[in-house]
Image (cartoon, rainbow, N blue to C red):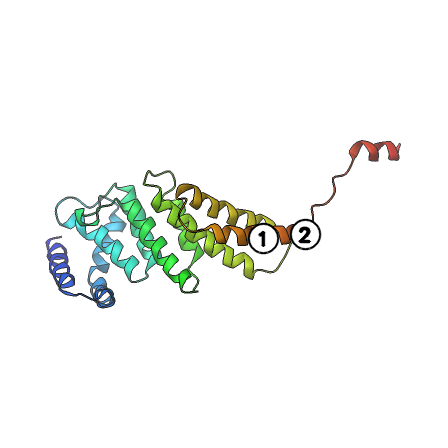
Amino acid sequence: MRPVALRLSHDLRRLKEIKAISLKIDAKRQMLPEYRDWIDGLVAADAGVGTGIAAEVAPTIMVWMIDIGLYAEALDLAAFLLRHHVSMPARYNRDVATVIVEEIADAALKDQAAGNRFPLDILERVEELVDGLDMHDEAPAKLFKAIGIESLMAVEAAEATPELGRAIEHVLGDLRRAQTLQPRIGVKHKIKRAEKLLAAHATAFPPAPEQDGDQQGSDAA
């Protein structure tokens, strides 16, 4: 364990010397493979991380994975950290759940603002992973905004079918939940788009009229 702790200390010093964020990300991409076997063994053993600087390695690597876009791998590691109640290093000023939510939601919102798509399954997995965990409202508000935006793009691009209405309602639920948690989260326009889409869907696929069972029974008699 000592070698990996020493490696982290060395790599953190190196990162501190790098000013540009893009160069920091490139450096993390180069550093990460050196920790792969240790992380794989740690998760396979499923016995926690111990104490001391070695306890900083796993949560730090989780953040690096997010930084370079290895979201699925980061969430695998996050599940381990949450299961064993591992703390984030003090320099992050947040707990594991909040880091997962904020960092991945921020990455999604950045992509979406640039007109790009973000893996919806990753966002939904984050939601599932932290379900029921306590955190400040700002973090889940970002997550539900990201989920709502991604889902809105999906339904807008989908073929119109009777079943699509339920998906649009789900989109509205996520966007409204984001706004409830953080009224200034910036989803009002998205909510209006979803409401307009739902109204158009209702016009195209009106609900079937209810059958009058008693009248049918009388007619049959």
Q: What's the amino acid at mark 1? A: Lys
Q: Is residue 127 left or right of residue 21?
A: right
Res 195 seen here: yes
Res 40 seen here: no
Label 2 residue SS = helix
- Front residue of 10/39: it is 10
- Residue 56: x, y in percent? 17, 50
Residue drawn 40% across the image and 47% down it? 184
Q: Which residue is mark 1?
A: 196
Q: Is residue 220 left or right of residue 186?
A: right
Examine the rendered structure and indicate whether residue 29 appears above or below residue 74. Answer: below
Q: Which residue is mark 2?
A: 203
User: Which image quadrant for residue 8?
Assistant: bottom left
Examine the rendered structure and indicate whether residue 183 appears above or below residue 200. Answer: above
For marks 1 and 2, the one nearer the N-term is 1
Residue drawn 20% across the image and 46% down it? 49
Residue drawn 68% across the image and 52% down it? 203
